[in-house]
Image (spheres, rainbow, N blue to C red):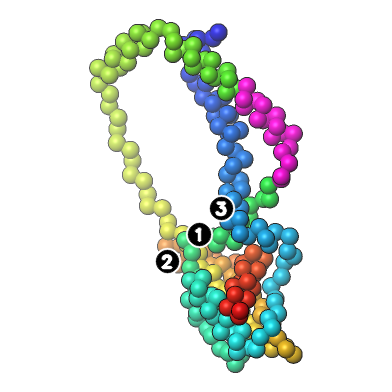
Amino acid sequence: MISLRSFPTRALAIPVAALMLIMTGCGGSGSARKAHPEFSKYDNEPYADTFSFAASPERTHRAVVEALQRRGAVISVSDSRSGLVTANLHSDGLLPEEEYDQQPVESEEPSAGSVLAAIFGVILFILLLGWLSDGCSTDSSSDSERTRTREREPQYEPPPPPEPAPPVSAANYVVSCTLTPEADSTSVRFAVVRQTIMNGTVTGSTPIQNKYVNYWLRDAILAQLR
């Protein structure tokens, strides 16, 4: 059995880091999908930005406004005659729907690489337990003496340098809804633009095509029409 004292402490950091990466690496990749399982019902839906509602333009217009306001959006334009509704939705970061869309879909069946990584992690964990138990069970008095010696030695630690204040980053989503009367229904087309805000200033504007945002808006409007 290899003693912990004969085994370099820095060398232990490498297998420990590898073990932690194996055990936790796969969990963070799908965190947004695990946090919002309600969006999974849209995974197999095709992209769409226009939906038809079996209601009059006036009733559909009211439903669009109420759905956006319930989400916390601020209505900037609401014109029932032209069929245009524009709203601003402020967020500290990306919308949950956009974070969800950016995460890869996790495979239900484990891959061969993940199985080998799990086996390697178990073996590595057993070896680490052996090293730690052997090192802790021998010559504990020497450790205590060295610890007391280090405690008596004066140690000077310079104060850490002040960290610069990080820029304040946020996002503003501009949601535009265009209503078009049809024979016995009303179609609504969604267009979403994400504005990046840095320290209170808009630094970029990006149109996004996110089916999860569009399908959520569709369902929110249908809920108001019921």
Chief secondary structure of the magenta span? helix
Residue kind at label 1, given as amino acid type: Gly
Seen in the picture, residue 25 relative to 143 is either above or below; the reply is below
The answer to whether residue 117 is magenta is yes
Looking at the figure, which quarter contains the N terminus?
top right
Mark drawn on residue 200: 2
Residue 203 showing in the rendered view: no
Q: Which residue is mark 1?
A: 93
Q: Do labels 2 and 1 touch, CB within 8 Å?
A: no
Q: Which residue is mark 3?
A: 35
Give the distance between the C-alpha atoms of the residues marked 2 and 1, in whole angstroms.
14 Å
Residue 36 showing in the rendered view: yes
Q: Quadrant of residue 224?
A: bottom right
Give the distance between the C-alpha atoms of the residues marked 3 and 2, in whole angstroms.
29 Å
Quick check: 88 left or right of 39?
left
Give the distance between the C-alpha atoms of the residues marked 3 and 1, in whole angstroms.
15 Å
